[in-house]
Each structure stands twice: as C-alpha cells, then as structure tokens.
Amino acid sequence: MEFLIANMAPVMFASLILFLLMGFPVAFTLAGHGLLFGLLGVELGFFQPALFQALPQRIFGIIANDTLLAIPFFTFMGLILERSGMAEDLLETIGQLFGPLRGGLAIAVVVVGALLGATTGVVSASVISMGLISLPIMLRYGYDRRLASGVIAASGTLSQIIPPSIVLIVLADQLGRSIGDMYRGAMVPAMMTVGFYIAYILLLALFRPRNAPAIPEEGRTFIEPNGSHGIPSLLVLLAVAVGASWLLSPMILSADAPIDETVVVGTLVGGVVAFALAVLNKVFGFGLLSQIAERVTFVMIPPLALIFLVLGTIFLGIATPTEGGAMGAVGAIIMALARKRLSWSLLKQAMDTTTKLASFVIFILVGSTVFGLTFRGVDGDLWVEHLLVGLPGGETGFLIIVSIFVFVMAFFLDFFELAFIIVPLLGPVADKMGIDLIWFGVLLALNMQTSFMHPPFGFALFYLRSVAPKEDYKDKLTGQTIAKVTTGQIYWGSIPFICIQLLMVALVMMFPATVMHYKDGASKVDPNTVKIEVQADYGGSSVFGGDSSGPIFK
C-alpha cells in the first residue's frame, strides 16, 4: 500500500498502457481508469470526492466546443469526394502526365496523395482508393512491389500532416492553440515531406531503373493527331497561369502579406486563369490546347478551388476552421453534383461513416477528460514534469526523448490514442520550458504520421493489405499473369518512407523556422513594451496635477 501511495501516478499510467496493449476499447479504458483510480485516490486521501463535481462541467464543455465541429465537416467532405470518383480521375490524369518518366507512376501517386490529403484528410479513403486504382497499373508495368506498396501507403498518410488534417485539429485542441496557426505552421513541413518522397523515387529510378519503369508508348492514351503527347501546350498554359498570378496577386494582397497567404491566393489566381482559358478553348473550339492540357486543367482545378475555399479562407482570416470545414462540405457536394455522381446512397454512406468517426473522437475525448482529472488529482502532471524537465540536454534533450517515446508508442497506439493520452501530459511541460506549442504540435504530428506506417500494426499497411492481390491473377488488359503482393513486401516497402518521415522530424527540430513562419502575419508589437499613462479630469482639474487632456496610450 505504501508503494501505491508513493507511486500512484506512474502505476496509473502504466496500467492504462497495459490495458490498451491488451486490446481494450480506448474510450472505456480511459474512463474506467479515471473512475477506478479516482476511488482509490479518495480512499488514500489524495483528494476529496468533491473533485469529481468538475466532471459534468468538463464534459459539457467538450460537447459545447464548436471548434471540434471541424472534424465531422472535414470527414464528410473527404468521404463525399472519395466516393464521387475524384481519386480515380486524378490518378488517371496525373499518371498519364508523369507516366513517360521513370518512376512517373509513383510520382503521380505522391502528387495525388497530397491533393487528396488537402481535400479529404482521410487515410483509409486515400490508401484504399490508390491501392485499388494505381497498384494494378504499377504491377502491370513491372514496378517493384516494395516501391509500389510503400509509396501508396506513405502517400495516404500525407493527409495526417497536410491541412486540413484531423490530426492537426485534435493537436491544436489538446495544446490549446489556434487551428489556423497549426495549419499555417504545418504547410512547409508537409510540402517538404512531399518533395522528399518524390526525390527518393527519382533517385531509385535513376540507380535502379528496372524497379520504376516508364509507361510504354502503347499505355499512353492522350495522343494528338500529329502523334505528340501535347506536353508543350500544357507548359505554355502553365506559364500563362504563373505569369497572370505574378501580375495579379499583388493587386489583391498587401506587400507584407505572409508567405502562406501569398501561395494560396497566387494558386487561386493562376488556377482561375487556366480554367477560364481551357473553358473558352473548349466552348469555342479554338484547338489551342492539347488533350492532356485540357484534361489536367479540368481535373485538377476543381480540387484546388476547394482547397482555396477551405484553407484560403482560413489563412486570410475570412473564416474559422469550423466555417471553412462547413464550406468545404458544401463544396464537395457541389463537385459531386457537377460530376453527376451524387446519390442518396452516397450521402447515407458518408453521413453514417462521419457520425461513427465523430462519435469515436468525442467518446475518447470524454474518457481522456475523466482520466486527466484523476491523473492530475494524484499529482500525475507534476510527476511527468519532474521526469522530463530534469532530462540532460535541456530543451533539446526533452524534444529528443519525447520524439523517441512517441515513435516507440506509435508501434502500438494510433494517433487518436497518442493525441488524447500523451499530448495532454507533454504539452504543459513543453510550455513551461518555453517551447512554442505550434512548433511542438507539428513536430508531434510528423512523428505520429509514422504510426500508420509501422510494421506490423500500421493502419495504412492494413488498408493496403485489404486491397492488394493476395493470389496471382491474370491482368485483364494484357492477359499476362501478375504475381501477388506479399505482406512482407508491403512491410519492407514502408521502411524507406518511415526513414523519410523521421528525417523530417529531425529537420523540423533543427530548423524551427520551417514551422515558425506562421508568426509572419502576427502583430510585431511586444506587449511588454506597451506603456499606459492615465490622466483623469474630475471637475476641471487633474487628480495627478497635470493637464486634463484625457488618457494617453503609448
């Protein structure tokens, strides 16, 4: 009993992790531990039963938190887009665009994964869609199975770091920071991750060309009457769009606008110009654009417009993340209607899945609130603080140990469990050490991204395993027999991309400016330098003996 009294907090935390590893439901494990150890805490004199009177108010606060409405909005938007065929169109078009390059199909998967991440934010939808569509094509043309499976799984996890990621919403809520700032901070690391994925594919294609071949001539569908592939026409359209963006964007934005606003608005302006030119060319039959140029424009501009509708309005301060999510959901419905793929069945499926996910998140949040109340009651927060603050190396040592701890725990826990259990314990310690919590949150998000890729429990690997061929099959187009994809190939394929994700964690840790640019648009006034002098006039005379000109603020 004396041991339990002296070590209540670590025993409570270790017991929680043990029960989670045994497979008990997360929400009920959290709430059950909170109540059980709460009763023990009352019996052992750690706190009074009156502490639990705070529970109803805390739970009501969760339900009343309108910021969390962004989660079902973005989930619903992603499910509608995924079921409306956007992924298929993007993969077919981008695959034809990059196909002539060695590794082009894999690059296309990364690009589409980034676009799906910025519009859907749902890992399962991205991985399953790309697994069903692109994996058979890559196998048909002789791609290495480890590269093909690894790039699909890794590209699907981009939705965890590219805004409007649900992970970033949860982290911002748990750290008590603005979702908009978290989105701003994550933009550069997200784009760097995409760039590293593409660089790895290009290097592999350079040194091992047999592992990532180009699409042969007979596999290319967008051929002009003169036999060309129409790429020059696309490059000209791109140059016109970039030029229009460069000329028109300064008229919309101020000269000192933050980089993220500049990128978003510039992309919108260039996209609108390209789309307008493509529409005019098609309606009036000018014949100035090639098939691939028109196809790329009509397939890519609508998702980019939706990205602006969501992220652009948030970055420009026009809408909150919740309002941006609502507009994104409406925009997704409009896109599905335009494609003539919206049906009651699709809506029902999307709403059912959204309700399940939202309920899942809320129940875990309620459970973590019960657990957190008791854990703080037994001085668990002080135990964690003393454990981490005293680490050698100060702030750097803390970040390294936390990164290693989160990486190891990600083998067994998914990002929701990590976000609701680990982050509330680490956030206050990081804040007390003077670490910027937006930077800390992005660092954790990059690390948690690996939880979907870890063999043998990574969910992205499970999703891909569910759609990858388990037996040899005959390709419908070529008639050749295609060998199956083994579980070992999927696991080995994930390892290079896990290394890239860990490299990003290290780079963000070494170069905080990759995240801290989110402050560029913030006020440069230091509150500590503000001086207020008050001069009050009562009946014509100043009580301070000065003139009676009124309050002065400096």
Image (cartoon, helix red, strand yellow):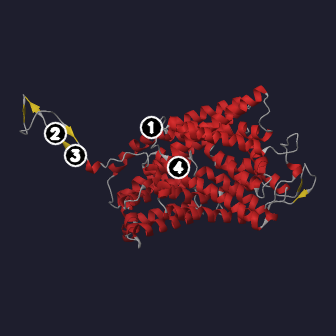
Question: In the image, what residue occupies the spot 52% across and 43% down?
Answer: 262
What is the distance, in whole Å, between disc 3 and disc 4 at their CAs? 37 Å
Q: Quadrant of residue 23?
A: bottom right
Q: Position of residue 81 (x, y in %)?
A: 67, 38
Q: Which residue is disc 2 drawn over?
A: 534
Residue on which disc 1 sits? 64
Quarter holding residue 359: top right
Q: Secondary structure at mark 3?
A: loop
Q: Residue at x 53, y 36 (%)?
A: 324
* Callout 4 amino acid: Leu
Q: Which residue is mark 3?
A: 531
Q: CA distance from mark 3 to mark 2?
A: 10 Å
Considering every residue shown, the one lying at the far right of the view is: 479
Q: CA distance from mark 1 to mark 3?
A: 38 Å
- What type is the residue that disc 2 sits on? Val
| First in sequence: mark 2 vs mark 1 | 1
Residue 168 numbered mark, or none: 4
